[in-house]
Amino acid sequence: MAPTPAHRPSGEPFQRPDRYFNVLEQWTWVGCYGGYYLTADLLHAAGFEHGFFTRRWQGRGPEELAGYLSTGASVHRPQQVHGNVVLPASKATESPWPEADGLVSDRGGQSLWVCGADCTPVLIADPDSGHASACHAGWRGVASRILPEAVSQLEALGARRERLLVALGPAVSAPNYQVENAVAEMVGNALGSRQQSLQTLERDGVTQADPEHGRCRLDIRRAAFLQLVNLGLRADRVSLCPLCTVSEPDLFHSWRRDQVKAVQWSGIVGQAAA
């Protein structure tokens, strides 16, 4: 049985059940007997079981976490390599997991999983066919256009891009993400059909100024959002989580903050009939 919301909307309980530290518009913490995980109201309203899990679930991988989303769902995950390969979920069923950074459901009852510790977990759902996708999108993934590839594969299964729903989960925020200008330029050049200057990226909110010469601050979720909108997805059907993995140490692992190899998982269950 799928868990029910403990409090909608609310922040995650912190130390005491009556104390909260976040109130997130369009995002909800769901409580179950194992803990709390974050959901996007956009996907929830369309009937897609999904969750962005926190570091408090450390030691529990997709094989266990899937049961909190949907009893009986099969588990599919890639071996992430910071690339742009998106595979059908049926090609990622057991260890050794195939190298990829995205999965697309190709039958019903599949739970798709990605992990990260600053990169953006991206969950995509097609309310018409019931198919879904999960992608791991850091700057390399956005620059190499992993999200357009996932959208293309969903379209091959009958989706219409203007109908897709997308949730961009917790990730590093711009104030905490200093990159070289060359990195920002590579990301910017992947956002649409024309090359983006640093001035244009700053105007569009993808980058912020940095006092160090040759560097800037990168908003990777904003970049992913613009890439999807420029691809033809509707802005009001793409939800950006405001939580930063670096600045919420109680909730999230962060490589940029701690330089420790530890991750949190995010997953979605496809609703296709077959």
Image (cartoon, grey):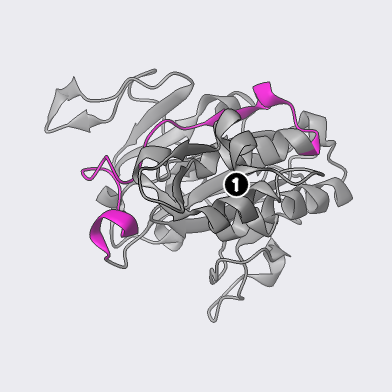
- Left or right, 258 with respect to 266, comes to left
| Quarter-of-image position of residue 102 | bottom right
Residue 31 position, x and y percent, is 33, 33
- Left or right, 149 with respect to 115, comes to right
Q: Residue at x 23, y 25 (%)?
A: 21
Identity, as a three-letter code, of the amino acid under mark 1: Val
- Give the farthest residue toward the left: 16
Residue 160 position, x and y percent, is 85, 36
Residue at label 1?
A: 269
Would you say the magenta stretch is mainly helix, strand or loop? loop
Q: Is residue 134 visible?
A: no
Against 107, residue 238 (above or below) is above
Q: Residue at x 27, y 30 (%)?
A: 12
Against 77, residue 158 (above or below) is above
Against 28, residue 267 (above or below) is below
| 252 part of magenta stretch | yes
Q: Is residue 20 visible?
A: yes
Residue 156 position, x and y percent, is 88, 51
| 175 part of magenta stretch | no
Residue 273 position, x and y percent, is 77, 45
Against 203, residue 212 (above or below) is below
Q: Residue at x 57, y 68 (%)?
A: 78
Q: Secondary structure at mark 1?
A: strand
Q: Which residues are magenta?
A: 231-259
